[in-house]
Amino acid sequence: MNAAKLHFPPESKSEHPTLAFTIGYTASYIMISSMNQNTTPKNQDHLPKILCLHGGGASAAIFRFQTRKIQYALRAHFRFFFIDGPIESEPGPGILPYFAGMAPYHRWVSYKNDEAEIKEEAENVLETIMEEVEREGPFVGVIGFSQGTRIVAGLLLREQFLNSGNDGSACGFRFGVLAGASYPPVRIPFRHTRDSSRASGDDDTTDHNHALIHIPTIHVQGIQDFVLLQSRRLLEHYCDVQSTTLLEFEGGHHLPVSLEDNKKLADMILDVWHRQGKGEQEVRTLNNGTTEPGF
């Protein structure tokens, strides 16, 4: 199998993350502010889809902006879909002043202690996810940043629980990417409100305290990130070491900025996808009627 050729936008001249966000991404900021939440380039309907979950106090539009380099690198291989968390909130860490004009901001869960409220928020998260799955799915992968990784971990635990023959609507996830991860996973119900099999009084969450994520995961960690210990704890306590890949980069609580780090991440995502045999199995029809491997 030939190695996939990756393409990247021009590198920002600044290597400082905050300057790169400001200088290198200004054009994308203007473009994303005016575009629809999810768009499909021409002739890419056949590509597998990845669901993208923003951090706390951000939004789908902001996360589309933050992930522009990895989207660009993988644009011939995947389509990316972004959704807002169900709770409107104040802007999160690192959002201001760079995204001051992109309110409203959203989060997936709040910091509640009441068990009933925590469960209700998890149900609302699942409802939000399943609406997108029903509208645009299935999704082969899921990418999360910061608080979004708590949802990613919960969704992957739910996915493998359903893949074991339990009742509920699966999303189709085959891998996950967790960047700047926080801890612990959100306990996502495995049956949502429209599942006809759901019965009142059923225990509808997986036991996160005794479960490992065996679905392949890629962990992206900035070595100066203030949540680095949480990221490592999530990896060590909830992920099967045999199915994890780790990318560490020089930086804080943000996605990789440099071309080199983004190329490594793109290679890791393609490698995980190929190792599941998807690259050989997926065949797409070209305009001239011939076929070639999807990757």
Image (cartoon, helix red, strand yellow):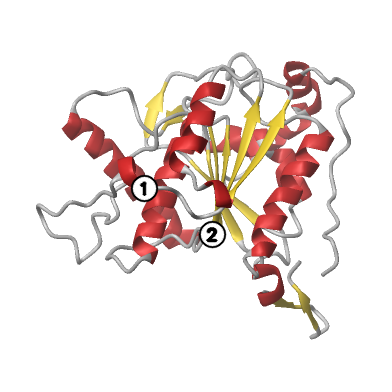
Q: Of the numbered discs in the image, which one, if any, rests on residue 174?
A: 2
* Location of the N terminus (image quadrant): bottom right
Q: Which residue sits furthest front?
A: 242
Towards the viewer: 240 or 249:
240
Residue 266: x and y in percent read: 74, 47
Residue under the image location 50 percent in, 48 percent down = 240
Tag 2, which secondary structure?
loop
Residue 65 has which mark? none
Q: Is 16 rendered above or below residue 172?
A: above
Look at the picture and state if 227 lies above or below 174.
above
Q: Is residue 107 left or right of residue 289?
A: left
Residue 46 visible in rendering = no
Q: On the rendered image, what quadrant is the C terminus found in? A: bottom right
Furthest residue in direction left, as rendered:
201
Above or below, 204 against 260 in this view is below
Furthest residue toward bottom: 289
Q: Position of residue 121 (x, y in %)?
A: 28, 36
Q: Which residue is mark 1?
A: 211
Q: Earlier in the sequence, mark 2 or mark 1?
A: 2
The residue type indicated by label 2 comes to Arg
Locate residue 35: give its quadrant.
top right
Of residue 31 and residue 192, the one placed in the foreground of this image is: 192
Side (left or right) of 149 relative to 245: left
The structure residue drawn at horizontal position 28% and vertical position 46%, both measured from the top left corner, is 207
Where on the picture, by quarter, is residue 66?
Answer: top right
Spatial separation of the CA atoms under disc 2 and disc 1: 17 Å
Residue type beneath disc 1: Ala
Give me the residue at 71% from left, 56% from top.
270
Q: Position of residue 232 (x, y in %)?
A: 53, 30
Horizontal side of 200 relative to 18 (left or right) equals left
* Along the viewing direction, whichever of 269 and 212 lies nearer the viewer: 212
> Element under label 1?
loop
